[in-house]
Every structure is written in C-alpha cells, then in structure tokens.
Image: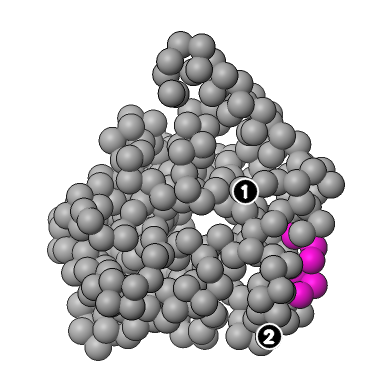
Amino acid sequence: MIDKGEYSFSTCWNIKKHTIGRNMIEEIKELGFRNVELNYNVTEEMMTTIEPMIEKGEIGVSSVHNVFPFINDKDYDTDSVMLGFDDEEKRKRSIELLIRSMEYAHRYGAKAVVVHPGEVPFDYNIDIDLKKLYRDHGKDSTEYQKLWRVMIERRDRLSPRYTRRIQESLEVVSEHAAKKGWDIAIGIETRSRSYQMPSLMEALTICENLAGSPVYLWYDIGHAMMMDRMGLYDNLKELQDVKKYIYGVHIHETLELADHWCPYVHSKDMTYFDHFLEAIDGAKVKVYELKALCEPGEIHESHNLITSKIAAMKGEGDRYGRYL
C-alpha cells in the first residue's frame, strides 16, 4: 500500500461501521495513512482501544474535532450556537468543552483542534429549505432568491454580534492554553450551512483580532465550495485574503450541494480543484474528510492526483521562482 506520508485521514469515513476503535483505525491504516483525525463521534469507549495504539506509535493523531470525545447533548453538537451563545452558562460550558478537547489533543500529540465555533441562530434550519429550492428551482430562481434574502438579512445583521462573542470565547481558551503551555492550534472551520459561522471574512476578522494567539482558519474545501455555490461568499477570491491564516485543511469535493466526495474522481472535473492545491500544500495539517461511499481505490486515485499535481505545481514554481 502506498504510504500517504504527512496526509491524515478522518475517522468520519468509517466510524459508523465500527464499535471497536482499534478496528476502525486499522482499516484506515490499510489505506496507507500514518495519521488520523479523531472526529467528534469518537466515544470514550472507542478510545480505550485506540489509546494503546497511540502510545505504542502504531498511529499518529494529527488533530481532534471538537467536541471530543463524543457527548450526547444537542446544545453542544456540531450544529449549535456553541462559542457564541447569548446564555452565559451555555457559553461557559462550550468554552470548557473546547478546553477538554484541547487536553485530549495535547495528550495524543495532535497539532490542532478543529472547531465549529457557532452560527447566527434561526428558529428552524432555514438552510434545508434553501438547499431544496436550489435543487428544485436553481440559485437564480425567484423562490430561492426570496428565501435567501430572508436568511442573509438576519445573518448580516447579527453576524457582528456573534463574531464578537465567538472571538471573546476563543480568547479565553487561548489564554488557558498559554498558561498550560500547550502548542496546539485552534482551527475555526468553514461550514456547510449558510447561517453557520465563520464565513471566510468572519474568519479573517477573528484571526486578525486574535493575532498572536493559536487561533487559525481550518479551511474545509468542500464546505467553502458549497457556500460559494449558494452565494454566501466568493470562495476563490476570498481564499487569497485568508490563505495566510490557514493552519489545516479538510480535503474533499462537493458535487452540487453534496459534500465529502473524492476530489477529481467523483466530479470527473480534472481542473477546478486545482484552485485549492496551493492551500493544501501550504497547510500544516492536511486531512481527508470523506464519506463512507468513497471506496479505497477512489481514495488512492484522488490522493495520487492531488500529490502529483502539487509536485508538478511546485516544479513549475521552482523553474520560475514562484514557490522558493
């Protein structure tokens, strides 16, 4: 099996088919990965068989995904107001949970914790309706645009408030990490729902305001593609503004509004994903985040395409002095 080197692989790919943690990790190792990202569905029970593997050096941990290990509480799951809660007790609990995730990351020698920092809250999941209208009628339809204006008006109006709250929470976590002496990045991740935070410009604001802290952007490529298609931001243009803050990447491709597919292989588009190769190459942590439908052969093919294209890109750069 081809060694995947510095590239890591998220347990989201096969966690639903395993109850024993070791078996889940062994299956990922068979793909040629030396490192994993432990996603937010990994339980404490699963870790009882994974921790010995980490201690013996059988597997490395590149990153953990907050909230880690799994807790069964909808207030603090991956789709919540989280670090932006108006309720101070809930916000305090969210901060504590992120610190807990960082403690595990430190214990396992991980470089980063991936964080879904929050959202502009709505009374219901308006994004489901928007995606249905997108699929049924198209982005330019009257139906889609009408509901989009409702969503974006509230999102734009409340974004500064929740950006500020998230930033304040991250400041508390950063200060705690500094006192502990932890060398762990906090990666705020681009999201897959239009009302969720951060957008690329919200991430830029937070990273700039917390300059000198361990807070960076975790650039989820597929999610950013999706938000660009829906109209939330200009992904390729704004990527140039935020790329200096990228610490980690989630590597996957979006087909229309369906994410976590293997780049190049499932879209059959051999050029568009090239836009993200520089971000992948520059990221300190590179993680494939793929759905269970992605087969081993497709994963290998996608990885080979990405790495060979990056090698060619850097070779071209060396010739013209662009990547030196």
Q: Amino acid at mark 2?
A: Thr
How was the colour assigned to the protein in this rendering?
one colour
Q: Is residue 18 above or below residue 186?
A: below
Pick whichever, 252 or 227, lies toward us. 252
Q: Is residue 41 above or below residue 96?
A: above
Q: What secondary structure predominates along the stretch shown in magenta? A: helix
In the rendered image, is residue 196 in sight? no
Q: Residue at horizontal 78%, vertical 52%? A: 31
Q: Reply yes or no: does residue 25 show up in magenta.
A: yes
Q: Amino acid at mark 1?
A: Tyr
Spot occupied by residue 48 in the image (x, y as percentages of width and height) = 68, 85
Pointer 2 residue? 48
Pointer 1 residue? 7
Spot occupied by residue 278 in the image (x, y as percentages of width and height) = 47, 32
**Screen quadrant of the C terminus:** top left
> In which image quadrant can residue 14 be found?
bottom right
Q: Whole-Å distance between the Cαs marked 2 and 1?
A: 24 Å
Pick whichever, 139 or 286, lies toward us. 286
Secondary structure category for the residue under label 2 = helix
Q: Is residue 92 above or below residue 276?
A: below
Pick whichever, 137 or 15, lies toward us. 15
Q: Residue farthest to the top?
A: 320
Q: Residue at horizontal 41%, vertical 65%? A: 184
Spot occupied by residue 105 in the image (x, y as percentages of width and height) = 49, 72
> In which image quadrant can residue 87 be found?
bottom left
Q: Residue at horizontal 33%, vertical 46%? A: 245
Secondary structure category for the residue under label 1 = loop
Write down the region rendered in magenta: 22-28
- Drawn side of residue 121 relative to residue 153, left or right: right
- Drawn side of residue 122 relative to residue 33, left or right: left
Q: Residue at horizontal 22%, vertical 69%? A: 171
Counting residues from the start of the chain, the first of labels 2 and 1 encountered is 1
